[in-house]
């Protein structure tokens, strides 16, 4: 039964699949559709701890799990999935365990010549012995009585795990069937952002879109019409064309990874170079904050003086991306240095990544940025390590989107203007231009990529004192 989370008379809000145990922990609890229970070894329900006692966090996690299950179950119901007898990874693991118990191995029934470990008839005998013991005389009759087999064949006795075990043993191991979900798992396991929760969730969501639209098919079974359907559904969902392109690029990268890592390069990628009608036409022009708006924001930040306003203050006078500030660690900021500055750098082991190579840089702290860092450090209790903004950052879980939603709502209410935190970057670019800052130094401060000559890539870069001088001029405007 859906859990009621709000009842205001005129408005009732509920969430399904959420269960709270006596321990206070929340669980995802959902009935498995009867026709799909074979993929879950006959289980009737999905029960998974959400590992939280916070109801709002539990609701968010339930939404993600429910969305993933919806996509998977849609794929298992798809005609392609039924025709190919696709299984979940759980069923495949159980099938491999069954073969081990029987002393068999995947592909053994498909080997020939000197590769064959035992005669094919011996493999059949092992399987027959198992199935006769399990299903009795009726199974043996279905194997030997042709008239009976016409009504009830041996395959009618097998459960999903046994069907998958037979498929595994008869599949040439040199020609494995690799599902798109397999390619995704391999991609996430070996990617440099392995362990980054947001990166994993984003990519699982992208592949979930493919599975919901076309099924979890083997790499090589997808065709251009499947890719077109995925694109069209993404567009129909109402997201911006740029977001559609980002999703398709991620899907394409995962598909290419599967082709490469599983030696399937001879198969084309149907998601490559998909055209998107009116691409770029729905993008909104980012407007910078005016000088008066920046003054209002700075004044309110000093008055409110909390972690959110510290975050805003740092972004206001550095022009850094919000995610770059959210992901700062205490050891990345140096307010007591001869040139106070922060170091925007990756901590990949902890899930802190940057947009590109140009994003890694040191930015002097002046004006409100120095105030914001100083106040944030004072709020950290004198610790020398850890996340500077723990409300939005923890190991392998940098919640820049959460911060953005909160800050953008506050900015609109404060300035009465339809501008977001990203407008700080546009403002900083203008502020630097207005004081005549050389373009190279503008790029160094903001981490903007440059299309200039190769020569700019030589040497160690600009001195902090140079960057500080130009930033101070811009902030004084």
Image: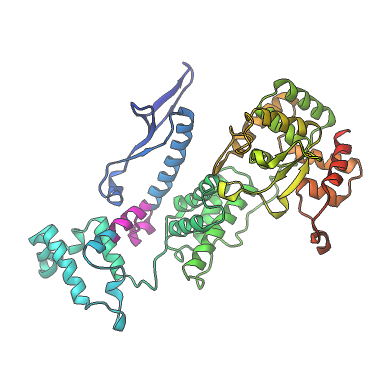
Residue 2 in view of the camera: yes
Residue farthest along the top direction in this orientation: 9
Residue farthest along the bottom direction in this orientation: 113
On the image, the x and y values in percent for residue 385 come to 61, 39
Q: Is residue 203 above or below residue 419?
A: below
Q: 211 or 194: which is nearer to us? A: 194
Q: Is residue 439 above or below residue 178?
A: above
On the image, the x and y values in percent for residue 184 come to 48, 56
Question: Looking at the rendering, in which quadrant would you find the C terminus?
Answer: top right
Residue 418 in view of the camera: no
Q: 325 or 220: which is nearer to us? A: 325
Tell me, yes or no, whether the highlighted magenta stretch contains residue 80.
Answer: yes
Number of marks in the image?
Answer: 0
Image check: 62 left or right of 402? Answer: left
Image check: 15 left or right of 130? Answer: right
Q: Is residue 127 above or below residue 372?
A: below
Classified by dominant secondary structure, the portion drawn in magenta counts as helix
Q: Which residues are magenta?
A: 76-96
Q: 300 or 33: which is nearer to us? A: 300
**Residue 170: quadrant of the picture:** bottom left
Question: Looking at the rendering, in which quadrant would you find the N terminus?
Answer: top left
Residue drawn at the location 48% of the way across and 71% of the way down = 263
């Amino acid at each position: 039964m859906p859990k009621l989370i709000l009842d205001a008379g005129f408005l009732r809000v509920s969430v399904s699949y959420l269960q709270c145990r006596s321990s206070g922990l929340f669980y995802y609890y959902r009935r498995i559709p009867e026709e799909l229970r074979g993929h879950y070894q006959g289980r009737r329900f999905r029960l998974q701890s959400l590992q939280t006692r916070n109801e709002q966090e539990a609701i968010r996690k339930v939404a993600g799990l429910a969305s993933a299950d919806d996509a998977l179950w849609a794929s298992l119901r798809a005609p392609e999935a039924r025709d190919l007898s696709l299984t979940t990874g759980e069923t495949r693991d159980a099938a491999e365990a069954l073969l081990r118990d029987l002393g068999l191995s995947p592909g053994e029934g498909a080997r020939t010549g000197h590769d064959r470990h035992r005669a094919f008839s011996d493999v059949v005998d092992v399987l027959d012995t198992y199935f006769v013991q399990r299903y009795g005389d009726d199974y043996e009759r279905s194997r030997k009585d042709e008239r009976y087999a016409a009504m009830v064949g041996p395959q009618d006795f097998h459960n999903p795990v046994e069907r998958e075990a037979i498929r595994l043993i008869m599949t040439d191991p040199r020609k494995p069937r690799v599902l798109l979900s397999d390619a995704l798992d391999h991609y996430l396991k070996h990617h440099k952002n392995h362990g980054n929760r947001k990166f994993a969730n984003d990519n699982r969501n992208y592949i979930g879109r493919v599975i919901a639209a076309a099924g979890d098919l083997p790499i090589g079974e997808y065709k251009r019409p499947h890719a077109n359907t995925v694109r069209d559904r993404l567009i129909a969902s109402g997201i911006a064309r740029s977001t559609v392109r980002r999703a398709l690029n991620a899907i394409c990268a995962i598909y290419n990874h599967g082709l490469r890592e599983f030696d399937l390069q001879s198969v084309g990628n149907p998601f490559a170079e998909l055209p998107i009608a009116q691409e770029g036409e729905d993008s909104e022009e980012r407007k910078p904050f005016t000088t008066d708006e920046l003054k209002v924001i700075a004044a309110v930040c000093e008055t409110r003086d909390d972690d959110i306003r510290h975050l805003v203050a740092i972004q206001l006078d550095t022009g850094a991306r919000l995610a770059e500030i959210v992901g700062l660690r205490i050891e990345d900021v140096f307010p007591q240095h001869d040139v106070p500055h922060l170091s925007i750098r990756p901590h990949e082991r902890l899930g802190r990544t940057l947009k590109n190579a140009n994003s890694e840089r040191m930015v002097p702290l002046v004006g409100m940025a120095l105030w914001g860092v100083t106040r944030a450090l004072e709020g950290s209790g004198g610790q020398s390590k850890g996340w500077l903004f723990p409300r939005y950052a923890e190991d392998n879980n940098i919640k820049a989107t959460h911060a953005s939603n909160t800050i953008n709502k506050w900015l609109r209410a404060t300035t009465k203007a339809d501008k977001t935190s990203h407008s700080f970057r546009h403002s900083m670019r203008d502020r630097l231009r207005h004081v005549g800052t050389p373009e190279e130094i503008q790029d160094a401060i903001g981490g903007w990529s440059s299309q200039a000559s190769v020569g700019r890539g030589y040497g160690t870069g600009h001195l902090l004192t140079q960057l500080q001088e130009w930033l101070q001029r811009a902030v004084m405007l």
